Amino acid sequence: MKTAPEWAAAAAAQRPAGLAWIDGRPVPSSSGRTRPTVDPATGQVIAEVAECDERDVDLAVDAARRAFLSGSWSRQGPRDRAAVLSRLADLILANLDELALLDSRDGGKRIVDTTAIDIPGSAAILRWYAESLDKVYGEVAPTGPGDLATVTREPLGVIAAVVPWNYPLEMAIWKLAPALAVGNSVVLKPSEETPLSALRLGELATEAGLPDGVLSVVPGDGPVVGQALGRHTDVDAVTFTGSTQVGKLFQLYAGESNMKQVWLECGGKSAVVVLDDVTDLDAVAAGVTGGIFTNAGQVCSATSRLVVQRGVAEALTERLLARTAAITVGNPLDPATDMGPLVSIGQATQVRSLLTDGAAEAAALVGGELEPGAATECFVRPAVLVDVAPTARIAQTEVFGPVLVTHVVDTEEEAIAVANGTPYALAAGLWTDDLRRAHRVAAALRAGTVSVNCVDALDVSTPFGGFGLSGYGRDLSLHAMDKFTGLKTTWVHYG
Ligand code: NAD
């Protein structure tokens, strides 16, 4: 691992071009307009990025459709597609430091996370789908003699992938790896906060041998580029990760245009339940703080509510507050930093305003102030709001920052009711030493993923997504390939 000064030198030497990637080549936006993308840790502009609009979306979708119809990718043999995706995984690893630095600078993400998790994780996911795609079989229906009915999975066509800023490259890969694996073309719209690694990915995909037009990257404003994709009549499906509010808009866009399929991975207000039989409270405190403060709390599945049984509440809270106070907030390019900045001043302001409201509803607020002496106002100290009513606004609203609220409950039943008591249902955590309680409570928790005695369990082999206002459809696992295909029956009568 490089030292902080070495990363700073690498950052100073990095000059991203900021051009869109459409039909296999770098292009300026049709309007010629650009938008600066800013490093939240320094306030400096990293690059001027093409500010695309509807015309660029039309060009990208048109290129995607032409590529799809040409069969250059959609009808390529599975093993040939696998080879290209594997090469792309290799190229991501070959450019690991560059991509990690782009995501760390663009999003304020810790370099230790982007180098160890985001970028290698992205390559591993691509490779997993590359290795899986030629192991998926069709079916023969039991129709009877004289007829042969095959059921095959067909790529949908043109997929629009619209992603957020918290894991810029990795969220893009979650979408495009399964979508490309089954033969679709993809138009990727990165967040306006963090477009740089996605633009580099477009370039690397072409270098890996992906035919022109199969992957285009169109940066720009959400309400302009995102909406144009959502309303485009030649887009077959949208796969979206982002806020619930924007997720609902994609349903509207689809309903008002061509009824395209819409897959939504939206927000969360996930609970971690701690039952009163746990003995290793230090391990639980480490798990609970890890579950909320990783990536400065900007994680959709962050366990932002602690639901703790009274018997262990005081001892656990004491440990949590000590751990929270010890977190170092600072330069994300310094490998020793525990927590970097939030993605933007806007996000930091929003988090702090929710905290101010929340403080009135809590027995105590610890942390949450701006980090003294920090270079920008994006550095918010991790915060714990102690003993908040479960119905309080701060306990029901997704903060998407380093803010934990705690609720003290008396019984197991109350713990389940409070944990399930929001309109979201993305993830949940549970700590207990009792195997029977573990199964009983895990079964009762409403969430796409329940992590028992571990933190935010996740693997490419397990589906990820939620219920309720957290959205529907699943990323990762073989199920993600299902949603980018449609079933086709071919019936041959020969009797
Ligand atoms: P966001 O909803 O503001 O933006 C997500 C994407 O949608 C961006 O690319 C943005 O440009 C685009 N967009 C914004 N407004 C749009 C509009 N009117 N029409 C079309 N597109 C539009 O979300 P964000 O602030 O980038 O990310 C934070 C949110 O994402 C949080 O709510 C978080 O929970 C959620 N998230 C969910 C998951 C998950 O897998 N469930 C993962 C990461 C983040």
Image (cartoon, rainbow, N blue to C red):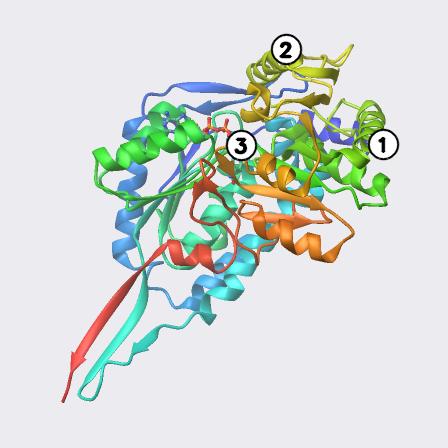
For the C terminus, the image quarter is: bottom left
Residue 25 relative to residue 251: left or right: right
Looking at the figure, which quarter contains the N terminus? top right
Which of the numbered marks, if any, corresponds to residue 168?
Answer: none
Secondary element under disc 3, as helix, strand or loop, is helix
Residue 366, position in %: x, y? 76, 17
Residue 196: mark in rendering: 3
Q: Is residue 377 above or below residue 50?
A: above
Numbered badge on residue 356: 2
Q: Quadrant of residue 402?
A: top right
Mark yes or no: residue 398 visible.
no
Secondary structure under the numbered disc 1 in the rendered image: helix
Q: Callout 2: helix, strand or loop? A: helix
Instruction: Check disc 1 and report the residue beneath it.
Output: 315
- Amino acid, disc 2: Thr
Q: Distance from label 2 to label 1 (Cα)?
A: 26 Å
Residue 373 image offset from top left, x and y in percent? 78, 10
Tell me which label, 3 or 2, sits earlier in the chain.
Answer: 3
Q: Is mark 1 within 8 Å of ligand 1?
A: no
Q: Amino acid at mark 3?
A: Leu
Badge 3 crowding class, 10 Å Cα cut-off, few under 14, some 14 to 19, many 20 or more, is many
Q: CA distance from mark 3 to mark 1?
A: 44 Å
Q: Position of residue 325 (x, y in %)?
A: 82, 22
